[in-house]
Image (cartoon, grey):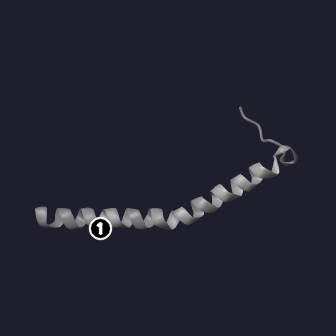
Amino acid sequence: MASLTPESLIKPVDKERDALVKGIVERAKPLQQALRDFKQDTLADIQGPCK
């Protein structure tokens, strides 16, 4: 079982990297949802006339 690392042992550069990745992920979430919606709409458009 893994244990948490005390914050005092985490290097500042690792904290900066963590913040950077979290920011990137937050920016990607709306894009992920937009792409999901686009795929669903496109599939519905394609399947509609083919039924």
Task: State left or right for residue 36 relative to residue 23.
Answer: left
Task: State left or right for residue 35 relative to residue 18.
Answer: left
| Nearer to the camera, 6 or 17 | 17
Q: Which residue lies under the disc numbered 1?
A: 41
Q: Relative to 7, say whether 22 is above or below.
A: below
Residue at the image position 17 percent from the left and 66 percent from the top: 48
**Residue 14 x, y percent position in the rendering:** 75, 49
Q: Is residue 51 visible?
A: no
**Residue 19 x, y percent position in the rendering:** 70, 58
Name the quarter where the C terminus is drawn: bottom left
Residue at the image position 40 percent from the left and 64 percent from the top: 35
Q: Find numbered disc 1 in the image and state the secondary structure of the residue it sits on.
A: helix
Q: Residue furthest front?
A: 13
**Residue 31 x, y percent position in the rendering:** 47, 65
Task: State left or right for residue 15 relative to residue 38.
Answer: right
Q: Residue furthest top?
A: 1
Residue at the image position 18 percent from the left and 62 percent from the top: 47
Q: Relative to 7, say whether 33 is above or below.
A: below
Label 1 neighbour load within 10 Å: few <14, some 14-19, many 20+ = few
Task: State left or right for residue 18 relative to residue 26.
Answer: right
